Image (tube, rainbow, N blue to C red):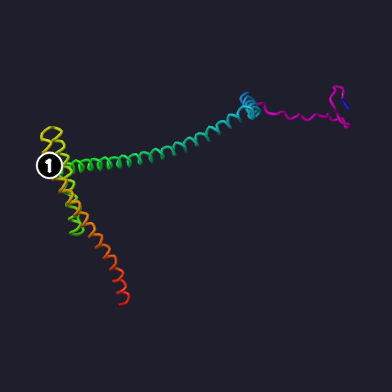
Amino acid sequence: MTNYAGTPVNVAGVAHTSTPTHQPPQRSREEVLRDETHANLKARWPTVVSPIASRLDDLLEMQETLETSKTRTQHQLTSLKNESTALDGDISAVESAVGDAKRYIEAEKARPFIASQIVQPADALSTQVLELSAEHAASDDLIEGMDQLLAEKKCGLSEFLTGVREVSREQFFRLQLKKKIIRAQRQKAATTAQQRPVQASYLRNY
């Protein structure tokens, strides 16, 4: 019930006082702005910040790939430089060898040809064959020289015919002697081939 002043009182006549309500503390302007900014960022994260972060991740991955490619390319360049250095050395060696070969060829051109210094006959018959072949080649050169003299009118026709007749006659005898020596070589080789099985049979029986 209430008294005349409108104040609630209990039945015993004691005035009833109401309990005061709890009020939240007053927030500063800075706290309010911070909370609002946080809420706005949280709301916009999926549409704005998240794509940017994803793009940054892609860029970082691309950077790592480029660095790996750069390292691999540097290794390849180093390998190519080493190969190029080796090739330069090989080219220098080849050029040096070519120069030596050219000098050797020029020296051989200036040196007179001596068959006995190049070809070593196996026996006396082979020596005769080699000498006869050399004489035959010299006769051919002589006939060619005489033909040149006739063409230049440095010798008469009769002299040319006489010289060719004598050289040809010598060539004929040398050719016949060469054939005879070759036949003797063949007979000697056949005899040696026949004796080898006899010697082998004798060694087996012994």
Rate crowding at label 1 as few (under 14), some (14 to 19) or many (20 or more) other CA atoms within 10 Å.
few
Residue closer to the observer: 35 or 189: 189
Relative to 27, is 189 on the left or the right? Answer: left
Relative to 21, is 90 on the left or the right? Answer: left
| Residue at the outermost bottom position | 206
Q: Which quadrant of the figure contains the C terminus?
A: bottom left
* Element under disc 1: helix
Residue 90: % across, % down: 30, 42
| Residue at the outermost top position | 5
Residue closer to the observer: 120 or 52: 120
For disc 1, the marked residue is 162
Residue closer to the observer: 6 or 191: 191
In the image, is residue 11 part of the stretch drawn in magenta?
Answer: yes
Quarter-of-image position of residue 121: bottom left
Q: Which quadrant of the figure contains the N terminus?
A: top right
Quarter-of-image position of residue 8: top right
Residue 141: % across, % down: 17, 42
**Image point (10%, 34%), residue name:** 154
Amino acid found under the numbered disc labelled 1: Thr
Tell me which segment is drawn in magenta: 3-27
Number of marks in picture = 1
